Image (tube, rainbow, N blue to C red):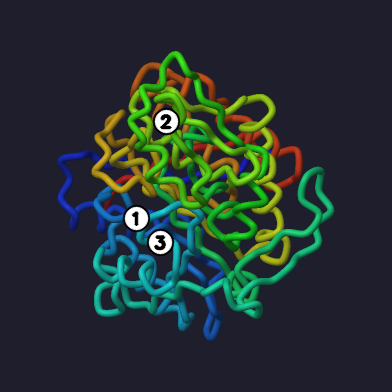
Amino acid sequence: MQSKVYFIRVSQADPVNVVADKLRTLIDNSGVLNFSAKGQKIAVKMHFGEEGNTGFVRPEYLRCICEYLNLKGSNPFLADTNTLYRGKRTNSADHLKLAYGHGFIRENVGAEVIIPDDSVDDAVMDLRINQKFIKVAKIARLFIDADCIVGVSHFKGHIMTGFGGALKNLGMGCASRVGKLMQHSDVAPIVYEDKCIGCGECKKICPVNAIHIENKKSVIDGLKCIGCASCIAVCHYSAIDVNWESGGNILQEKMVEFASAVMKSKKGRLGFFSFATKITKECDCIAKDDPRIAPDVGIFSSTDPVSIDKASFDMVNSACEKDIFREIHPNRNGLKQLEYAQELGLGSLDYELIELQQQ
């Protein structure tokens, strides 16, 4: 059965106010947020960007979404969880400070920002899902306690999953740090000694000191490694990677199983927006201003996370006239996550694209 995906074109030349007006047109005409009602707590799940990164969805656009929800009488709040890798988002205090620094303050967006501290037991909920890999998913409680979830994602490439969109935003993004570790547990990287020059950049970034230099080559202690993939992202010589079939595919399936845990109690109360703008090689976790790999395409909305990811994937590749995601990450098959999500009943790969025009 086809799912509806609404779309409005955006150009890199469009100023912020024009993009905001286009987003309002998308919100008003897609009906994706029609589930919102007076008094509902609505978690707007997003990514606030790492320090130095500018690819994240801008606060001006989140304001458009929160304005609509506030007018409905709902109580929206912006939220994300802390990370495994080293950076400004490993703990709630620094993560919140970074979000504020990127402009996500109540005066700008019309909603509070909440970063749960999952070192507190009550902040995490164990959800039994009994899937192939994950039996009990560890999810930040505020996403489960919320009446509805609006997923706002920046569609871009990703070092481990080929690309990241709505499903990754839910599955990886709503998991506690322990839940993230569960997803990465099969992703112990290997070092290609013929490419490694022993520069030590991977050693510096490893959050658990699992890497040391021996005979001018990096050595990874698989017993200490948590599979966060920071070393893969930082290596300039392609000297570190994972066995894709045994690690990367499993990670995608675990991620989708976590997404199923988040979606389980929210049937009919989920909406998604995907910004295929400033499309970059890596995700917004990279602490630098990653350059574009594709022209801006536009903004998508849907109640189906599988369809919105597939439509975004198709439209970006169409604009590039090639599979740009396979080109930048040749050993990654990002469609694995979509195929598995459809298999679990989270959505459909078959969609109807409805293009809207600015009013």
Closer to viewer: mark 1 or mark 2: 1
Mark pair 1, 2: CA separation:
24 Å
Q: Is residue 161 left or right of residue 287?
A: right
Q: Compared with residue 41, is residue 3 higher up or lower down, i.e. above or below?
A: above
Question: Which of the numbered marks, if any, corresponds to residue 315?
Answer: 2
- Per the model, the C-alpha gap separating discs 1 and 3 is 9 Å
Q: Residue 240 appears at what percent x and percent y?
A: 48, 27
| Residue 102 in the image: above or below residue 344 | below
* SS at circle 3: loop
Query: Which mark is on residue 89?
Result: 3
Query: Looking at the image, which residue is at 54% across and 35% down?
Result: 220
Front label number (1 vs 3): 3
Front one among 221 and 294 = 221
Circle 1: residue type: Gly
Q: Is residue 126 above or below residue 341?
A: below
Q: Amino acid at mark 2?
A: Met
Label 2, secondary structure: give it. Answer: helix
Residue sitting at 78 percent across and 59 percent down?
A: 136
Q: Is residue 233 above or below residue 267?
A: above
Residue beneath the point at 62% across and 25% down: 243
Whether the residues at callouts 1 and 2 have beta carbons within 8 Å, the answer is: no
Q: Which mark is residue 49?
A: 1
Say if mark 2 contacts mark 3, CB within 8 Å.
no
Residue 19, x across and y down, in percent: 24, 52
| Nearest to viewer (mark 2 / mark 3) | 3
Query: CB atoms at circles 1 and 3 under 8 Å apart?
Result: no
Decide which of tag 2 and tag 3 comes sooner along the chain.
3
Q: Amino acid at mark 3?
A: Arg
Residue drawn at (37%, 27%) of the image: 198
* Residue 305 percent coordinates (x, y): 58, 48
